[in-house]
Amino acid sequence: MRRRLVRTTMVATAGVLALATAACTSAATDVSTPVATDGTTAGAATPTPTSTTAKAPLVVGAVFDHSTLDPTRQFDRSGALLTHSLYETLTTLDPDDPTKVVPGMAEYTLSPEGRWLTLRLRKGLVFSDGTPVTTDDVIFTLERAKGLSGPAASIIGTVSTTKVDDRTFTLSSTGSNFALPAILANPAFGILNSTAVKANGGTIGPGDTAGGYLSQHSAGSGPYVIESVRGSSEVRLKANPLWTGPKPAFPEVIVRNLDAKRQLTALRTGALDVALDLSPNQAEGVDAGPQTSSVTITTMRSSSLVYLALARDKALNAWTANADFDEAVRRGLDREALARTAEGSMPAAGLIPAGIVGALEDLAPAPTPPATDGTGGTGTPNPTTSPPAPSSTAPSSTGTPATPSAAMTTGANGIPTPVVTLPIVPARDLTAAKAALRRSGYRGQPIPLSYAADLPIQGIPTTALASAVRSQLAEVGIKVQLNPAPAAEALAAYRSGRSAFSLWSWSPDYPDPENYLAFAPGELVGSRAGWARGTDQVMDDLTDAARSSVGDNRAGAYAAWQLAMNERSPFVPLLQPATRFASGDRVTAVPGNPVWTLDLARIR
């Protein structure tokens, strides 16, 4: 029997998506009783199991990119997916609006100037071995994060922790740190059982050897604990009996490392309940072949960014370090066409994706719609028709930049705001691109484009995107040579600054624009491209202004930073892809999230 295909589409950053049209088997969640967004039965004061029937384990397919389940050391998609279910964080993201930070393990208060964050742990919190959670565990976790080299240490910075009592503590920063509540929601800051971790090699500093233990055992207070780990092929989780939150619908979860093709096969045969990496084409054709039950494809806007990086290190490649060559690349790319290579994607106007404070798309003036009679008057808006871009921003035949204007104006309450004009997405200008290429002196030398061949971006095969970039730049006169490599190898080269020209994606570590300052000179991603602080004073000043911006000033400051980055940085924003999940008939709700992809404990 062929499975009927049910598609649900939602344009949103994330959130729980109820799949009411999916068929249910005897093992599926009983959806006859309304379920509130926190997982409790509507109108009830305590969590209520959704079914009395024993359930087979939930099976999830994903491409593994993590090398550890130590929450502090992992900073990859599959690592965050798993550790979020094993460890609670001090704050978390609102499941219905993940751009909002809400209390997690602790209630918190941020001082008006953003320098002090006071937190108080909830009563009754215990780790999975029954040990009470205290301030000492929090301090150990955060200090350990700072002591270990890596992304977690980079984003927590020099924040200091002061103990008030066993449940109360303060975090202080040297300057305004309005992003700190959002930072603490990242699974990398899952609170550790300090006693258990110290007993297994944990310490503060480079001498820590607890990573091996934490890759096989849980030391947290989350809804699940590790049952078993089979190398890099499978992780089995089981419900934490001491978990105090809403009871997971599935007492056991199996997450298997499967490429997109095997995920599709397993989904069709009913061996998989959720697939995370189907490409748009695979999602469209999921109902082809022998099938036994229904499949739902759920699509939502992601907060991921696909971008190109051109290293400024002449020793790596003289051309990527050449400003005119970089301009030729930027002006020679058609972002609108690239977005069309993957259904549901939108072209990127800047480094900050739509939906996060400061995104250029969200600050752009809404175009005046034409009248329904086609006369250009002020009649009823016609959503299917877009007005032409103003002539002042049309592609120039003289090489004039066609990017959004960086001029500033004074908005409400006297707050300076950048004037963001159409087209919001930088327009392709082949004439200007070819002129810049001639100025660079480039003579057709092959330019290797590095990328992780086996690590799809929101299900989009990276080779497809790399090939599209190669084709577009060939029209400029640039000879791009595809240089695919296994993910581990490609990531190691990129993170150590050994990739001259590369294609990558960035998913937010926390949903705040400050996270994207990692692309600035001297910061985490900027350094990977050999872009040092002090080499571009304009960008240094704009970065400092964005970081210190407060309240209503933040959107404008980050927009101005992006407009300058579009012209001066070694990064080229390409597109913002969609997130798509494929789920079988045992799943009725898919709780997506931009940071940890999927909340396993809230799947219904």
Image (cartoon, rainbow, N blue to C red):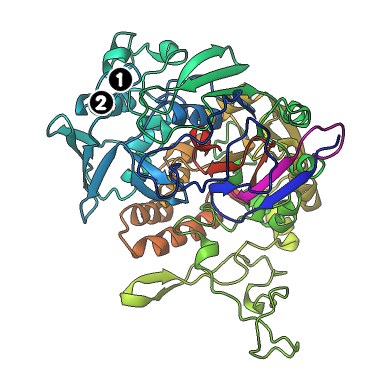
Query: Residues in magenta?
Result: 286-302
- The three-letter code of the residue at mark 1 reads Asn
Front-lying residue, 116 or 494: 116
Q: Is residue 145 left or right of residue 595?
A: left
User: Is residue 157 in view from this perspective?
Assistant: yes
Query: Mark 1 and 2 residues: CB-CB less than 8 Å, in contact?
Result: yes
| Crowd rating for badge 1 (residues with CA inside 10 Å; few <14, some 14–19, many 20+) | many
| Residue at the image position 37 percent from the left and 71 percent from the top | 416
From the top left corner, tell me how far across and down residue 118 is, in percent.
20, 43
Mark in front: 1 vs 2: 2
SS for dot 1: loop
Q: Quadrant of residue 29?
A: top right
Whether 95 is drawn above or below 194: the answer is: below
User: Is residue 303 in view from this perspective?
Assistant: no
Front-lying residue, 413 or 70: 70
| Residue at the image position 49 percent from the left and 38 percent from the top | 525
- The three-letter code of the residue at mark 2 reads Val
From the top left corner, tell me how far across and down residue 114 is, in percent.
24, 51
In the picture of the structure, the residue carrying the numbered disc 2 is 133
From the top left corner, tell me how far across and down residue 577 is, in percent.
64, 48
